Image (spheres, rainbow, N blue to C red):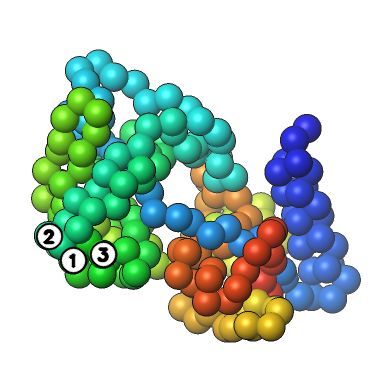
Amino acid sequence: MDKATVQRQVQLSVAESVFRKEGKLFVPVAASARHVHLCHADVEKLFGPGYELQKFKDLVQPGQYACKEQVTVVGPKGKLERVRVLGPERKDTQVEVAVTDTFALGIKAPIRMSGKVAGTPGCTLVGPYGSAEVSQGVIVAARHLHVSKAQAAMFGLKDGQSVSLRSGGERSVIFENVIVRAGDGHDLEVHLDTDEANAAAMAGSPMMEVIR
């Protein structure tokens, strides 16, 4: 069992134990760096006909994984190189960046929940085989809290519910408007982007308190 798996089990055990004893909910936090989800057509445009994404490592969310593949994201003003592709393939290509990244790209990306790409700006993706013109799909991901059905029932959370999160440390902050995503394919974890994590000076394997 690797170190990350052990740490994950400890965090889940702490969350459940503290909740049962004190009624307080502390959840593990992941800083989600810029990344790309690709549809099959764009996988082939970027990496070649018949290409299949190669798994690099599993992520906490069930069935999700980081791929070995990386691409360059190009906007009107600049570009971001070595942006990680996440699998599996999706119906629509989506590029998730932090607000700081939007300045570098020159793209006014809206804050959206993952998958809500209608009406969002596009970009150009460049891979080792070719490029793909993405007409829409560049977003700043809204901060959110993943929970499974069982965890939602245990902690009294509902899908679509908005909660706040409080961090500790010297740069303690409260993040509001954190959307709960509950159901199959989810497991207890908060996703913030790198701008948000840096603002709170997060390091290591932090946990934040849920404020209802």
Residue occupying the point 36% across, 45% down: 83
Name the residue carrying label 1: 106
Residue occupying the point 50% across, 81% down: 176
Mark found first going from the N terminus, 2 or 3: 2
Q: Are marks 2 and 1 in contact (CB under 8 Å)?
A: yes
Residue 19: x %, y % from top left: 79, 69
Q: Is residue 79 above or below residue 165?
A: above
Name the residue carrying label 2: 76
Q: Judging from the image, what secondary structure is the residue with disc 1 in? A: loop
Q: Quadrant of the C terminus?
A: bottom right
Residue occupying the point 70% across, 79% down: 168
Q: Quadrant of residue 211?
A: bottom right
Question: Is 105 on the left-hand or right-hand side of 135?
Answer: right
Q: Is residue 59 above or below residue 95?
A: above
Residue type at mark 2?
A: Pro
Residue 99: x %, y % from top left: 34, 70
Residue type at mark 1?
A: Gly
Tell me if mark 2 has few (under 14), some (14-19) or many (20+) residues whose alpha carbon lies within 10 angstroms of its own.
Answer: few
Q: Are marks 1 and 3 in contact (CB under 8 Å)?
A: yes
Q: Quadrant of residue 48?
A: top left
Q: Which mark is residue 104?
A: 3
